Amino acid sequence: MAYSQKGTIPADNLLKTKLDSLVNKSALPFMSESSRVGLSIGIIKDGKEYFYNYGSTQKEKQVLPTSNTLYELASNSKTFSSTLLARAVLNKKVTLTDDIRKYLKGDYPNLQYKGTPITLLNLANLTSALPNWMPDSREIFAKANPDSIAYILDAVHRKYSRQQFYTDLHDVKLDTVPGAISRHCNTAAQLLGHIMETVYGEKFGTLIKKEFTTPLKMKNTVLLGNVKLPASMAFGYDAKGRKMPFIDWEDMQVAASIASSTSDMLQYIKYHLNEKNADAKLTHQPTFGDLKNGAIGLNWKITKPENGPVRISHTGGSLGFSSYVVFSPESNSGIILFANDSDMKTQNELIKLAETILY
């Protein structure tokens, strides 16, 4: 096992190249925070792949992560659904302007606002006007001890079935016209995942395996809840160092339950870097907002800095994990960062790490 220069943080960084030194200089301050446990970084640059790992897969004993260690992708799982959507569009199975009710069983007259329905595009570019979470647990959380919220959320969703989700969907009232405002929405991601199952006639786990992990040789990627917990899975922790439950809830599975490694996610990034893949390219097209302030494609955030190529990115945060993916087809480069802790700052710190290391 190689160690960082300070000798206090386990790492496999050999410190032989300029990139090694740059990664180390950036990673050590990040890992020095008391809530940090482990960090895995995968980089593709000039066609070459690089991997760096720091800390541990768990707090209980020292196990240095590797490029094959699994972390929860959380919201980064949503990009798989939107890539499936792009393929369905290109194969003329659906159109982006389809009313989502075309793919739902039952009658949902409420899924419109003053005659404007929610479309598949609205689900994928965060403009559906649907509530962020179902069921709405804000009243419970308002009265709860902040330290208990993660456990309450886990308890609620472990009992919340897909059938209950659709029952509650009948009671949703939109507060604005779909397409007008972009805001984070787990409910939209759940619906998009479910609709892709309907369109393709396959369960989400089967689709992930058939459409992504098998052809891209992503051997470490699984849908949590569908399989026994892999031995190479890291454990996630909150800001106080408490081990957190995994997001393997039935209702959220299609939106947040993919677990993967840096080695696998670099294969996924490489697929997206090659815009000869028409489905990947379609997901990168801005559909809402502007490039200067951050546009939205099909789930991806797309930005164009003043001095640099267009960047395509997505963040992920669960009860115990944080992740960040950013890449640029123009420069054929990308980076994935995984941390097995989740506090108020982790995601932003990962974004800063990516900026320092790659851009």
Image: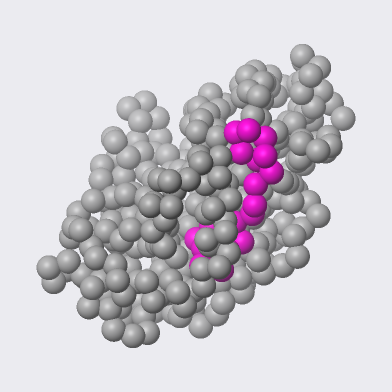
Span of residues in magenta: 237-257
Q: Residue furthest front?
A: 143
Horizontally, is 317 left or right of 169 in the view? right
Horizontally, is 212 left or right of 143 in the view? right
Q: How is the image coloured?
A: one colour
In the image, residue 87 sits, relative to residue 41, either above or below, namely: below
Identify which residue is drawn at 36% across, 38% down.
Answer: 303
Q: Which residue is nearer to you in this view: 4 or 303?
A: 4
In the image, residue 277 sits, relative to residue 191, either above or below, namely: above
**Occupied quadrant, residue 177:** bottom left
Can residue 325 be spotted in the picture? no
**Occupied quadrant, residue 192:** bottom left
Q: Is residue 232 magenta?
A: no
Can residue 9 be spotted in the picture? yes
Residue 118, x across and y down, in percent: 26, 68
Identify which residue is drawn at 57% across, 56% down.
Answer: 154
Residue 358, x across and y down, in percent: 54, 29
Residue 58, x across and y down, in percent: 76, 40
Identify which residue is drawn at 37% across, 43% down.
Answer: 302
Q: Which residue is nearer to you in this view: 47 or 323?
A: 323
Horizontally, is 343 left or right of 129 in the view? right
Horizontally, is 304 left or right of 324 in the view? left
Q: Residue furthest left?
A: 114
Q: Residue furthest right?
A: 1
In the image, residue 347 sits, relative to residue 95, either above or below, namely: above
